[in-house]
Image (cartoon, rainbow, N blue to C red):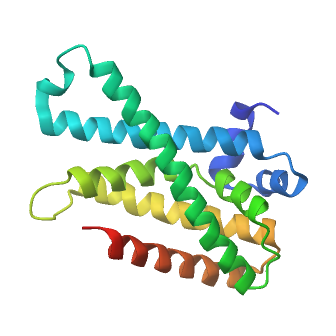
């Protein structure tokens, strides 16, 4: 099945998408999702650099190199972040009665990565390049909240289908994952 044919099901979290991971056919789709996520994350860094440096960031012969480096940085960062999220998901799945399986969990996270295409770059931009004084404009806050809810729903669906956990247990497990993740971000952010 082609990626573009599968995209609407990825965005809505249809059961057949997460069944791909159970059948062992999810790896190409997962990798595409993570690479797209990394590119978008890198572009959010590039946009932030341009916003802060103005025209100086676009001047010179190294502008393409800067863009390429930030995109590669984004791809590697998102692979690392999603691996960390995989470990948290695995622990939550095991704690709430799922079988776990690190490779299966990594594929389930990769299949549920579409909401993170918005969430990760927007959160990165807001935290790293946001306004002075710590306020966030509504133009960033509303999409962040909506993409957070969307990601919560898709990760919950992935846990229900991929781990065989009931809907209520999956909701509590995903809530615990998010609480732990936000706590970790808070501890490590400057």
Image quarter for residue 107? bottom right
Q: Is residue 111 left or right of residue 151?
A: right
Residue drawn at x 38%, y 31% is 69
Q: Quadrant of the N terminus?
A: top right
From the top left corner, tell me how far across and down residue 176 is, in percent. 55, 82
Residue drawn at x 78%, y 60% is 104
Q: Is residue 151 left or right of residue 139?
A: right
Image quarter for residue 105? bottom right
Q: Is residue 132 visible?
A: yes
Q: Is residue 64 left or right of residue 136?
A: right
Image quarter for residue 52? top left
Q: Nearer the viewer, residue 150 or 57?
A: 57
Q: Quadrant of the C terminus?
A: bottom left
Residue drawn at x 31%, y 41% is 45
Residue drawn at x 83%, y 76% is 99
From the top left corner, tell me how far across and down residue 87 is, in percent. 63, 69
From the top left corner, tell me how far across and down residue 25 is, in percent. 85, 45
From the top left corner, tell me how far across and down residue 186 is, in percent. 33, 74
């Amino acid at each position: 099945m082609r990626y573009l044919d599968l995209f609407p099901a990825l965005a809505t979290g249809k059961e057949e998408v997460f069944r791909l991971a159970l059948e062992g056919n999810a790896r190409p789709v997962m990798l595409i999702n993570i690479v797209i996520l990394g590119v978008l994350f890198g572009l959010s860094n590039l946009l932030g650099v341009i916003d802060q440096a103005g025209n100086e960031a676009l001047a010179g012969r190294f502008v393409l190199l800067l863009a390429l480096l930030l995109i590669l940085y984004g791809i590697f960062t998102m692979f690392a972040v999603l691996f960390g999220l995989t470990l948290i998901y695995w622990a939550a799945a095991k704690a709430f009665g799922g079988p776990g399986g690190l490779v299966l969990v990594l594929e389930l996270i990769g299949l549920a990565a579409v909401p993170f295409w918005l969430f990760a770059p927007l959160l990165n931009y807001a935290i790293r390049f946001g306004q002075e004084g710590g306020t966030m404009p509504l133009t960033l806050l509303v999409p962040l909240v909506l993409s957070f809810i969307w990601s919560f729903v898709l990760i919950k669906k992935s846990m229900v289908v991929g781990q065989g956990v009931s809907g209520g247990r999956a909701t509590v497990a995903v809530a615990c994952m998010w609480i732990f993740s936000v706590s970790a971000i808070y501890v490590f952010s400057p």
